[in-house]
Image (tube, rainbow, N blue to C red):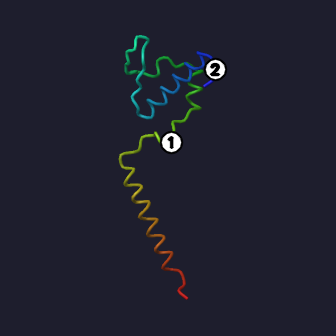
Amino acid sequence: MTGTQSEGENFEYAWRVRASVAGYVVIAQGWGEDAFVVGDTYTRMDDDRWAIADRLRWPWRLRRRHPLAWARDWLFWQTAGLAACWLLLRLPMG
């Protein structure tokens, strides 16, 4: 990003909130090389940071899938396969 340090910090805190909402554990690094888990990502949010967070969208491929998403996908493909077979059988043979 191109901007000031203040703008960069605003985006960092907004992304922290988005990451925690997506289900990820947010880990930050302090000044002394010690990494720590951020317990509450909402504590330093102000109106400007909330406005940024509302515009941000977590990348689709990094979103967590529902535990039963495989069943939904399987059902979708089975239904699509049955529909394709039904349509092929209804085609006139001649």
Q: Residues within 10 Å of mark 2 (few under 14, many from 20)?
A: few
Asked if 77 appears above or below 52 in the picture, the reply is below
Quadrant location, the N terminus: top right
Q: Residue at x 44, y 65 (%)?
A: 79
Q: Within the image, what quadrant is residue 24 found in?
A: top left
| Secondary structure found at label 2 | loop
Residue 89 screen position, x and y as percent: 48, 79
Residue that extends furthest to the bottom in the rendered view of this protein: 94
Residue 84 screen position, x and y as percent: 48, 71
- Please state which of residues 39 and 26 is positioned toward the viewer in this rendering: 26
Asked if 69 appears above or below 31 in the picture, the reply is below
Query: Which residue is denoted by mark 2 in the rendering?
Result: 3
Q: Nearer the viewer, mark 2 or mark 1?
A: 2
Cα gap from disc 2 to disc 1, whole angstroms = 26 Å
Q: Residue at x 62, y 17 (%)?
A: 4
Query: Which residue is denoted by mark 1 in the rendering?
Result: 60
Q: Within the image, what quadrant is residue 29 found in?
A: top left
